[in-house]
Image: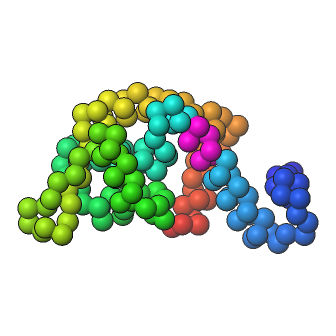
Amino acid sequence: MILAKIEDILKAKNLSLSKTAIVNLLYTYGHISQKLNNALKPYDISLQQFNVLRILRGQNKNPMSLEMVQERMINKMSNTTRLIDKLVKKEYVEKSKNKTNRRKVNIVITQKGLELLSQVDILIDNRESSILQSLSQDETKEFIRLLGKIHG
């Protein structure tokens, strides 16, 4: 039984059903993050940096502001400015001043960033599939539906 499993992992007893669900979700998030970060490690980028690159790629070379990137990020608690600066240093992203508002910065993905994503996308897709391989297609759909109810 899954309820007992997470309690065994945490060596906790008598957790309420809601606490067990939340702790299990957080534990699973950590497990998935670790697997995806390990897949990205050879490319010297983090999962958050990968997320930023995918967001920028979706803009088709149209610049985005820092605020726009932050709005679309999966993990909004990360330091987006620092992430962008690291990607600039690696030449995956370029920053330039916004011509209409000098306090804002335009951010675009570079060709080098696009090339990195083309290499990493397949690897991440395969890793994501392997993470969910224990679920059937119907279970995966139900999982998505239930998660949507939580954050919805």
In the displayed structure image, the side of residue 23 where residue 116 appears, left or right: left
Image coordinates of residue 77 in percent, x first then y, are 48, 65
Magenta residues, start to end: 32-38
User: Where is residue 132 drawn, in percent x and y?
Assistant: 63, 39
Q: Residue at x 70, y 65 (%)?
A: 22
Give the camera-side residue of 14 and 140.
Answer: 14
Residue 2 in view here: yes
Secondary structure predominantly adopted by residues drawn in magenta: helix
Point out residue 88 in the picture as x, y percentages from the top left corner.
30, 46
Residue 34 among magenta residues: yes
Residue visible at 62% across and 40% down in the picture: 35
- Residue 62 is left or right of residue 140, and the answer is left
**Which residue lies most toward the left here?**
99
Residue 87 location, quadrant: top left
- Residue 7 versus residue 34 in the image, above or below: below
| Residue 133, quarter of picture | top right
Task: Please name the residue shown 91% across and 66% down the image.
Answer: 13
Q: Is 87 in front, or is 109?
A: 87
- Closest to the observer: 3 or 51? 51
**60 relative to 23, above or below:** above
